[in-house]
Amino acid sequence: MVMKSVLVPIEDNEGAQSILQTALVFARRFGSCLEAVAPLPLIDNYIVGEMVPLWPPAQTGTGDSSREALLLFERFMEEHDVHRRERASQGPCWAMREGALLGDSAVAAHARVFDISIVGRPGSGSAGPRLSLLEAVLFESGRPVLMAPPAGLSERSTIGETVVIAWNCSTETARAVAMAMPILVQARRIRVLTVEGATVPGPSGEDLVRRLRLDGVEADAVTVTPAGMTAGEASLDHARAFGADLMIKGAYTQSRLRQMIFGGVTSHILANATLPVLFAH
């Protein structure tokens, strides 16, 4: 069980360095090949994804924009001694898809043949990573998404050694756990976290622990009371206290519209996570 093929949609914006740093740490951990693509958003990506009429950032031309993003990726990999795929005998490597992918749905379609995609945590302005890109890959690729924290990671950072599974008994989280098994089988510590009052009918955290044990994956189960916090706040607070370097979360058990109006765990984590989060829907 491995995660060898990793898609890295890269745009030359404020989140680019955090995405590249997270991708590097992930590739070194799992011996992955990172393939960069340059998305070019369409105007409806902004309107539908962000739900506000944002105009795409000024560009000097589609060709120039995609080349700048791919050059940024190439320089970063060379500076960190990661070799091109054709020159790498073992360990992490990289490749690029020449030209741009027009629209977030095109990126999501391309992601269907990769083990995982790495994107940035969405920002509130137009200068950083876009929620519309993350959601397109999440909903349309059928593959998991790894969200990079905005502060990035150092070369000494880890991913997937100390893992919190944000377990709410849902179909979405069950799918996220299944997709994350190549990571879980290599983890040192795993905590199955349930927040009281934030679940749907389904198997308990203890049930999941017993299931993981059949695959040789050791974990423990904890249920916490929010104690004045929201479920999202309690989840991130526990992950920090546990020293987690990765959270696994099923995305949008409640609908996006409902979360936009009333709030929700996914929305809170999308806006506030400071550690990498693996999402699946």
Image (cartoon, grey):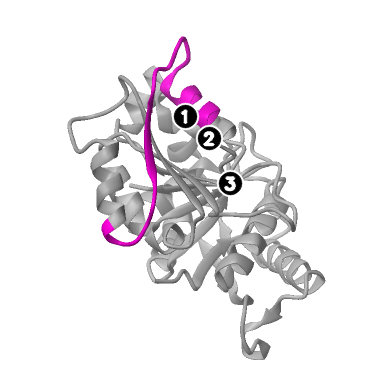
- Mark 1 and mark 2: Cα distance apart in space: 6 Å
89 lies above or below 19:
below
Label 1: which residue?
235
x, y (%) of residue 114?
43, 69
Amino acid found under the numbered disc labelled 2: Ala
Judge whether residue 252 can be spotted in this image.
yes
User: Given contact means CB atoms under 8 Å apart, are the residues at marks 1 and 2 in contact?
Assistant: yes
* Residue 76 falls in image quadrant: bottom right
Which of the labelled discs sits on residue 201, or is there none?
A: none
- Magenta extent: 214-238
Could you tell which of marks 3 and 1 lies nearer the N-terminus? 1
Cα separation between marks 3 and 1: 13 Å
Kindly identify the residue that appears in the image at 59 percent across and 73 percent down.
99
Q: Residue at x 30, y 19 (%)?
A: 197
Sort mark 3 into few (<14), some (14-19) or many (20+) by Cα contacts within 10 Å: some
Q: Tell which of 194 and 154 is nearer to you.
A: 194
**Mark 2 secondary-structure assignment:** helix
Quarter of image, res 112: bottom left
The numbered dot on residue 239 is 2
**Rendering coords of residue 159 (x, y %):** 58, 54
Identify the residue at the far left of this view: 201
Q: Is residue 216 magenta-colored?
A: yes
**Residue at position x 66%, y 41% in the image:** 150
Q: Amino acid at mark 1?
A: Ser
User: How far apart, in angstroms, are the residues tagged by discs 3 and 2?
Assistant: 8 Å
Against 136, residue 270 (above or below) is: above
User: Of the residues under marks 3 and 2, which one precedes in the sequence?
Assistant: 2
Residue under label 3, please give it. Answer: 245
